[in-house]
């Protein structure tokens, strides 16, 4: 079954850390760019980061640079997002998504909720 | 950063045509994708490369992109089409932009 399954979300205090994971199955993971996209409660979609298929190219949205680190393990078919120095405004559902570049994000996980609150 | 602008809401009667606009500087020079997100669900791409439909997306969904505006058109809108719709484009080779989203109401 072609799917992405995120895990690792939860409640964390401002300044804290969290690591999200995304397990891929049913497709050749190593062929695809992968991305993290988030959605704050009641708000729109916001691209966070993406990584090329080999891991050699990485980009982040400005607001998370220096705090978030994306990584992947093609052997384990997994994508991760290490988040440190979390802020209240990082509260959101975080989606793992497969990127087909100009064909769009064609496969999404169910999302994992990160809540940053004291 | 590159900004994509959508109307917050659009209303349409069942069976009529809904149009959702997405504007951005020289957007016609970029490829645009459209996503449908129903309440409590993950987004699904309904249009990619401006005009193309993924397999499984009904023919009533179509798209266009020219100048500074891309448009998602839903012909013969059905109640099941009620959802939030987002446009998306690559700001550059390194960054992705999403529009703010449009809530489509079918009434």
Image: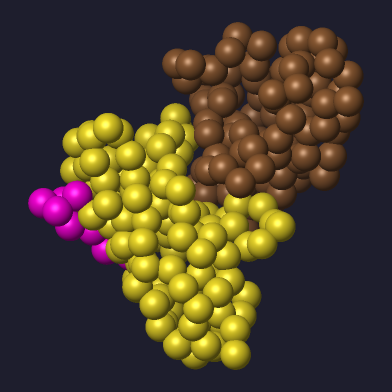
Chain colours: A yellow, B brown
Depicted A21 relative to depicted B68: above or below: below
Q: Is residue A93 above or below residue B93?
A: below
Percent x, y of residue B74? 72, 18
The N terminus of chain B - image quarter: bottom right
B49 on left or right of A88: left
Q: Is residue B45 left or right of residue A25?
A: right
- Asked if one can make out residue B75 in the rendered structure from this viewpoint, the answer is yes
Residue A95, image x and y in percent? 46, 53
Q: Please give the name of the residue rendered at 45% of the width and 87% of the height, measured from the top-left corner.
A: A16
Residue found farthest to the left: A75
Give the vertical position of A95 relative to B44 (above or below).
below
Q: Is residue B73 above or below residue A41?
A: above
Q: Is residue B11 left or right of residue A42?
A: right
State the image coordinates of residue B94 (x, y, percent, origin top left). Answer: 44, 52
Query: Observer-nearest residue: B33 or B45?
Result: B45
User: Which residues are drawn in magenta?
Assistant: A70-77
Looking at the rendering, which quadrant does residue B70 occupy? top right
Residue plotted at (48% across, 16% down): B56
In the rendered image, which quarter contains the C terminus of chain B? top right
Residue drawn where x is 82% and y is 10% of the image: B15
The image quadrant that residue A41 belongs to is bottom right
**Membership of A39 in magenta stretch:** no
């Amino acid at each position: 079954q072609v799917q992405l399954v995120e895990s690792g979300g939860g409640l964390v205090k401002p300044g804290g850390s969290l690591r999200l994971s995304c397990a891929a199955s049913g497709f050749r993971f190593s062929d695809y760019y992968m991305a993290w996209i988030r959605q704050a409660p009641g708000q729109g979609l916001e691209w966070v980061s993406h990584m090329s298929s080999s891991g050699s190219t990485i980009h982040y949205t400005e607001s998370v640079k220096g705090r978030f680190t994306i990584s992947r393990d093609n052997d384990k078919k997994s994508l991760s997002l290490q988040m440190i120095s979390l802020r209240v405004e990082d509260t959101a559902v975080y989606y793992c998504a497969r990127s087909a570049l100009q064909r769009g994000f064609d496969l999404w996980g169910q999302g994992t909720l990160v809540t940053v609150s004291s | 950063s590159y900004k994509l602008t959508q109307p917050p809401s659009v209303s349409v009667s069942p069976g009529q045509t809904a149009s959702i606009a997405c504007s951005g500087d020289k957007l016609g020079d970029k490829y645009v994708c459209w996503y449908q997100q129903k309440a409590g669900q993950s987004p699904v791409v309904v249009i990619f490369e401006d005009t193309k439909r993924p397999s499984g997306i009904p023919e009533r969904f179509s798209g266009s992109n020219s100048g500074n505006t891309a448009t998602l058109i839903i012909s013969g809108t059905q109640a099941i089409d009620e959802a939030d719709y987002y446009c998306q484009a690559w700001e550059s080779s390194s960054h992705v932009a999403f529009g703010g989203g449009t809530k489509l109401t079918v009434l």
